[in-house]
Image (cartoon, rainbow, N blue to C red):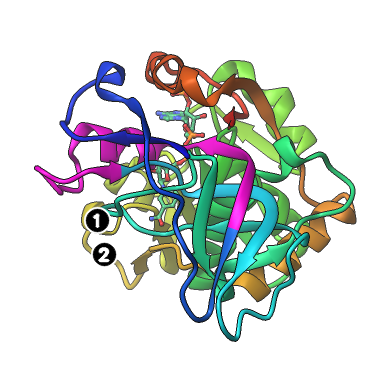
Amino acid sequence: MRAVVVTAFGGPEVVRVVETELPEPAARQVRIKVAAAALNPVDAGVRAGVFGGAGKQLGLGWDVAGTVDAVGAAGGWSVGDEVVALHYGVVEPLGTHAEYVVVDTDAVARAPRSVDVVAAATLPLNALTAVQALDLLELTSGQSLLVTGAAGAVGGFAVQLAAHRGVSVTALAREGDAELVRSLGASSFTAGAVEPGSVDAVLDAAVLGERALAWVRDGGAFAGVIPKAAPAPVRGVRVGAVEVSADGPRLAELGALVDQGVLTLRVAETYALDEAPKAHARLAEGGVRGRLVLIP
Ligand SMILES: NC(=O)c1ccc[n+]([C@@H]2O[C@H](COP(=O)([O-])OP(=O)(O)OC[C@H]3O[C@@H](n4cnc5c(N)ncnc54)[C@H](OP(=O)(O)O)[C@@H]3O)[C@@H](O)[C@H]2O)c1
């Protein structure tokens, strides 16, 4: 099969499409025939060497939508099931940017029924990250949340999930994104000016750090998205950072929210698998709204 890998770190030019052996599922794993696989910032990070793994072949791709193609012992899934999954890991030899991928069964969920497979591929990583970041904040209906990077993938899902729970959401995004983030459910918009101590919590998907921590009231809560970059706690604010975990049952709940119209899936552009370097170059240009999706 063909798979997208890096064997040296660098820019989009180090991304290669190689022929490799079809992987076999072990016990409690399934093999998915990939129909679509989103490209995320983490893939650019792996490519650039942010997570290490020098000298190894590193597979790219965490998000997948496709069809179960083979099942290991105690698989729990059947060949032909249409699924989505999160393939977690920064130093794996193969990822979802491939014709087939093997994932653990507990990372898999039935695909949402109301969207096509390209849109479905944009769900797992960023919706799971958003909901797991919201878990850290422990907000209740009526409380206030500021989401930075609200027009992005994590931020956009966070806005929708929080608004759905009755949380009052302020979206921090670029000037041109005001209409978009309001359509996702934000009740207020800011391009950067925020009163210090004015919100119960911040979900910092734009990684603004201490600047965003200052906007949380004393005793409130802050959730970052880069564990190593979380700011030090101040004024009794609980500070945490999400490290996404693959969670099939939770992913199934998120898929159900897609089918209920609560979560919107956004696709920017699609690329053939062989065009992976071009997709990386587009991501590196910045300003993408919605995800770039590879189609084997
Ligand atoms: N810890 C985990 O498990 C985990 C999981 C998933 C993602 N992440 C991380 O979460 C972050 C967000 O991921 P993503 O996929 O949502 O990225 P994304 O889609 O690129 O979204 C980031 C958004 O933030 C905006 N932004 C950045 N700086 C801003 C600023 N100063 N003011 C206003 N808007 C600003 C960006 O706008 P422009 O495009 O115009 O710059 C973009 O809309 C990334 O760092 C990613 O690596 C962590």
Q: Position of residue 94 (x, y in %)?
A: 37, 49
- The amino acid pointed to by label 2 is Val
Which one is in front in this view, the residue at disc 2 or the one at disc 1?
Answer: 1
Q: Which residue is mark 2?
A: 234
Left or right of 130 on screen, residue 182: right
SS label for mark 2: loop
Residues at marks 2 and 1, CA–CA distance in whole angstroms: 9 Å
Does the CB distance between marks 2 and 1 fall below 8 Å? yes
Q: Position of residue 179 (x, y in %)?
A: 74, 24
In the displayed structure, would residue 198 be above or below residue 133? Answer: above
Magenta-drawn stretch contains 99? no
Q: Is residue 43 magenta?
A: yes
Residue 265 visible at all: no
- The quarter of the picture where residue 265 lies is top right
> What SS does tag 1 mark?
loop
Q: Which residue is mark 1?
A: 231
Q: Which residues are magenta?
A: 32-58
Q: Determine the residue positioned at 27% across, 44% down.
A: 58
Q: Is residue 180 visible?
A: yes
Residue at the image position 44 percent from the left and 66 percent from the top? 221
Question: Who is closer to the viewer here, 4 or 112?
Answer: 4
